[in-house]
Image (spheres, helix red, strand yellow):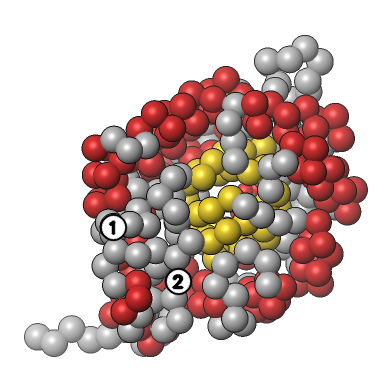
Amino acid sequence: MMRRKIAGQVSLEDLARICPIISRRGHPEFEECRQLEVEVAGVRFGAGVPVVIAGPCAVESEQQTMDLARSVRAAGADMLRGGAYKPRTSPHDFQGLGLDGLKILRAASDETGLPLVTEVMDVRLVGLVAEYADMLQIGSRNMQNYPLLVEAGRSGKPVLLKRGMAASLCEWLGAAEYIANEGNLKIVLCERGIKTHAASEYSRYLLDLNVIQAAHEETFLPIIVDPSHATGVAAAVESAGRAAIEFGSDGLIIEVSNYGVEAGVPRPLCDADQAISPATLRRIVAFIRNREGTSEAAAAATIAGVSGPNR
Ligand code: PEP
Ligand code: MN
C-alpha cells in the first residue's frame, strides 16, 4: 500500500525544497566534510573546537552579573550568556530587567572580553538588543515566530536559534532558513530538550542527542547543546554536556550561579535548580580541552557525519 503523505506534514525529504540555502544538498562546497564557521566577535563555532557559553539564566543585578561573568571567564568559558528579557510561564514571575539588563550585560562582556549572547523575544526590540549583544538568541518558544526570525536575519548579527521544544528537525531548519533568506548565514543551532510523553513523567524535557548527527548531515550550520534547560537539574548538566560533546556537538550553553558558593549570593529568581557552580563549569571546560586532538574528538566528528579539515 502506498503511504499517503499527510497534508501539511513536512519530512526530511522535503528539506531541499524548504531550506535550499542552508541544506547541504546542492552545496558542493559543503559536501560531506566541511561545516560553516560562524564567528562571533572572535569566537568561532564549527571550527573543530567546541565553544562554551556560560552565565546566568537571567540578569538580576549588576553585582550578580559582573561577579558571575568573572567566574565563568576564570572557569574557561568562551562566551557570556544571560537574559534581560525572559520568557516566563507566568506573567507574575520575574520578567527580566530589560534595557537595564542589556546595559549590565554589555558592561560584563566588555570587562571580561567574553562576547555576549542574549535573547530577543520581541520583533520591535531586535534593533535595541542588537546594539548591545554580539549574538541574538531566539528562544525555544519563538522558534517559529517568523517575523522575529526575519528581523533577526536583517540585523546582520549572528543568531543562536534554539529548537522549539516540540519542533521536528525539518521545522527547525525551516526556521533557520528564514534567517538565511535575509542574507544572514551567521546561524548556530541549539538543541535544548524536547517534550515527549516520557520526559513529562520524570523531567520537563528530553535531551535529543540524536539530532546532533542528523542536523550535521542535513545542514552545514554548527549545532550546540543546552544541557541546562534540557535536563533541568544541576546534577545532570555535567554528564549531559559531556555526552553532547561525545555526540559531536559544536559547543555548549550552560547556566551558572554563585548561589551556595559565595556568601550572600541570593538564589536565582529563574531556573535555580539547573544552575551549576563555576567549579563544575571548569570541569566541563577541562573535559573539552583535554580531549582535543584525541581519538575521541575524531570519533565525535565522525559520529556527527562530517570529518575533514574543519572538523
Ligand atoms: C534561555 O536560554 O534562557 C531560555 C529561556 O531557553 P529556552 O528558550 O531554550 O527555554
Ligand atoms: Mn533559563
Real-space Cα separation, disc 1 to disc 2, in angstroms: 23 Å
Q: Which residue is mark 2?
A: 173
Q: Secondary structure at mark 1?
A: loop
Left or right of residue 187, residue 113 in this image: right
Q: Nearer the viewer, mark 1 or mark 2?
A: 1
Task: Determine crowd level at label 2: few under 14, some 14-19, many 20+ residues with C-alpha closer than 10 A.
Answer: many
Task: Determine crowd level at label 1: few under 14, some 14-19, many 20+ residues with C-alpha closer than 10 A.
Answer: few
In this orientation, which residue lies closer to the viewer: 6 or 300?
300
Q: Residue at x 80, y 32 (%)?
A: 66
In this orientation, which residue lies closer to the viewer: 15 or 144?
15
From the top left corner, tell me how far across and down residue 122 is, in percent: 76, 67
* Mark earlier in primary sequence (1, 2): 2
Which mark is drawn over residue 308?
Answer: 1
Task: Identify which amino acid the numbered label 1 is placed on.
Answer: Gly
Left or right of residue 175, residue 153 in this image: right
Q: Is residue 58 visible?
A: no
Q: Secondary structure at mark 2?
A: helix
Q: Is residue 148 above or below residue 269?
A: below
Q: Residue at x 75, y 56 (%)?
A: 133
Q: Is residue 266 above or below residue 117?
A: above
